[in-house]
């Protein structure tokens, strides 16, 4: 493929967000948004309100992150012995019983990934706000990785779902999901929505002068 | 209004001039590295075959026993969605809803949507509303989490095998195969080609 050194925005064109068809930008941008002639989606140069939506979802996720980690995610009863576990106490329990692999999976998926995802999103938002021109390719790659790994946070929710479904033997053993699961589900949904709202093209916009 | 010889990178907006891409190749943006196009030989046939396999595996995964749990002489056998029903009955309907969407509704809609598009396409007859269905499939993809569910299953099985006997059911094997089939569908999709064909019709 041959490359021009300019973006479609500079060339007064809009790439359709749904089917990627390149269209000429409408003459008066203030009017009703034009539609893509191929797939009829509304045409926008960048995702609508990308920055404020990403901020809103990221802040919501950060607020949900605390109760998700502090409240119990499971209540279990085995042989009359009740036990409540948060995500962290679950990880510690796996380490104590020698199940290192499981401890690592839960720690990475439930604690590390949501935290890293939030740190990266906040960093990208601030770097776009400051019109940073520092290593845009690496920042785009960082965004791509963040978007791709987020789904793995669901591992613990699925593990709890199977646990409560399976362990239902009355007095012998019983398992219930705790309120922590609810907040954790909220963390997963809001971080995914935050990543979907962010437009990586904003990283590259800072490299072009704004006078066009 | 449209300029068919140019495309813009969807991740950094850089303009590229398109040329016909030989099949089996992946074209990346030279500025940010995003995948711009991915061509595959016999793409329609391949997607159709994979999706039909996926439908069969999905049905097996949902209709047959998933796991059995036995402790102190008591046995409980569950299907894939038993846990969702228990979560719902415990009042965590939001969590139950999220799990239902990610392991049942999203993958099922994807499979049915793909069949709706690719069966007519295979016979060279475009389906009505196929752009709408195609967009729905693209938007649902992040919410279909079969491979993550597989890992969650593994975690629970290892965890419980310390205290009880866990017997894997047919559905677990079907789920395992389905994860690979869905990954192959995602890797084999060529949205660029789909939209170009729409243009020619
Ligand atoms: Zn690019």
Image (cartoon, grey):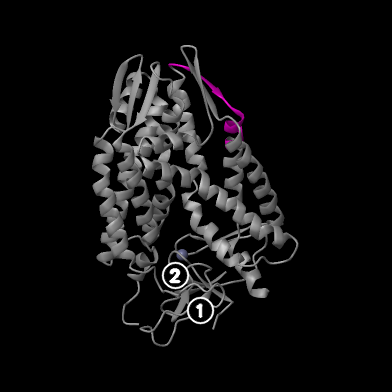
Q: Residue at x 47, y 50 (%)?
A: B143
Residue B25 location (% of width, % of height): 63, 58
Q: Is mark 2 within 8 Å of ligand 1?
A: yes
Vertical arrangement, residue B30 with respect to residue A211, above or below: above
Residue B41 seen from this side: no
Using the image, name the chain to which the residue with label 1 belongs. A
1 vs 2, front mark? 1
Give the SS element for disc 2: loop
Q: Badge 2, how many Cα within 10 Å: few under 14, some, many 20+?
A: many
Q: Residue at x 33, y 38 (%)?
A: A181
Question: Residue at 43% across / 66% down in the picture?
Answer: B12
Residue linked to disc 1: A23
Q: Determine whether, in the image, residue A190 is placed left or right of residue B59.
A: left
Q: In this view of the protein, which residue sits in the foreground, B72 or A26? A: B72
Image quadrant holding the N terminus of chain B, namely bottom right
Q: Chain of mark 2?
A: B
Image quadrant of residue A66? top left
Q: Is residue A79 left or right of residue B123?
A: left
Quadrant showing the C terminus of chain B: bottom right
Say which of A182 and A208 sits in front.
A182
Residue B13's label in the rendered image is 2
Residue B3 image offset from top left, x and y in percent: 56, 80
Q: Nearer the viewer, residue B39 or B132?
A: B132
* Magenta run includes residue B166: yes
Q: Does the CB distance between marks 1 and 2 fall below 8 Å?
A: no
Q: CA distance from mark 1 to mark 2?
A: 13 Å
Q: Is residue B13 magenta?
A: no
Q: Is residue A147 visible?
A: yes
Q: Are marks 1 and 2 on the same chain?
A: no
Report whether the residue tagged 1 is closer than 8 Å to ligand 1.
no
The region drawn magenta spans B163-175
């Amino acid at each position: 493929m041959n490359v021009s050194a300019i973006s479609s925005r500079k060339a007064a064109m809009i790439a359709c967000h749904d089917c990627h068809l390149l269209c000429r930008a409408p003459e008066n941008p203030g009017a009703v948004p034009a539609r893509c002639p191929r797939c009829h989606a509304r045409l926008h140069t960048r995702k609508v309100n990308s920055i404020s939506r990403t901020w809103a979802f990221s802040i919501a996720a950060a607020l949900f992150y605390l109760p998700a980690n502090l409240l119990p995610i499971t209540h279990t009863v085995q042989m009359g012995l009740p036990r409540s576990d948060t995500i962290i106490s679950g990880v510690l329990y796996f380490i104590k019983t020698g199940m290192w692999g499981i401890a690592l999976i839960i720690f990475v998926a439930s604690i590390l990934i949501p935290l890293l995802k939030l740190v990266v999103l906040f960093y990208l938002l601030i770097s776009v706000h400051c019109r940073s021109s520092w290593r845009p390719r690496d920042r785009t790659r960082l965004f791509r990785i963040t978007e791709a790994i987020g789904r793995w946070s669901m591992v613990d929710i699925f593990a709890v779902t199977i646990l409560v479904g399976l362990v239902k033997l009355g007095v012998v053993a019983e398992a219930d999901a705790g309120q922590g699961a609810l907040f954790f589900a909220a963390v997963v949904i809001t971080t995914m929505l935050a990543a979907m709202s962010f437009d990586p093209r904003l990283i590259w916009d800072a490299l072009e002068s704004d006078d066009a | 209004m449209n300029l068919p010889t140019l495309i813009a990178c969807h991740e950094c907006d850089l303009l590229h001039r398109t040329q016909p891409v030989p099949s089996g190749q992946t074209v990346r943006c030279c500025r940010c590295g995003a995948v711009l196009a991915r061509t595959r030989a016999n793409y329609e046939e391949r997607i159709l075959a994979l999706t039909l396999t996926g439908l069969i595996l999905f049905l097996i995964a949902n209709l047959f026993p998933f796991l059995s749990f036995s402790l102190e002489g008591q046995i409980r056998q569950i299907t894939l969605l038993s846990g969702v029903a228990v979560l719902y009955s415990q009042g965590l309907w939001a969590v139950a809803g999220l799990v239902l969407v990610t392991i049942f509704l999203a993958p099922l809609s994807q499979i049915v949507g793909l069949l709706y598009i690719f069966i007519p396409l295979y016979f060279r007859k475009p389906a009505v509303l196929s752009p709408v269905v195609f967009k729905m499939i693209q938007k649902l993809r992040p919410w279909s989490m079969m491979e993550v569910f597989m890992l969650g299953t593994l975690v629970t099985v290892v965890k419980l095998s310390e205290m009880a006997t866990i017997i894997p059911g047919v559905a677990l094997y079907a789920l395992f195969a389905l994860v690979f089939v869905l990954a192959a569908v995602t890797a084999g999709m060529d949205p660029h080609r789909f939209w170009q064909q729409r243009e020619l019709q």
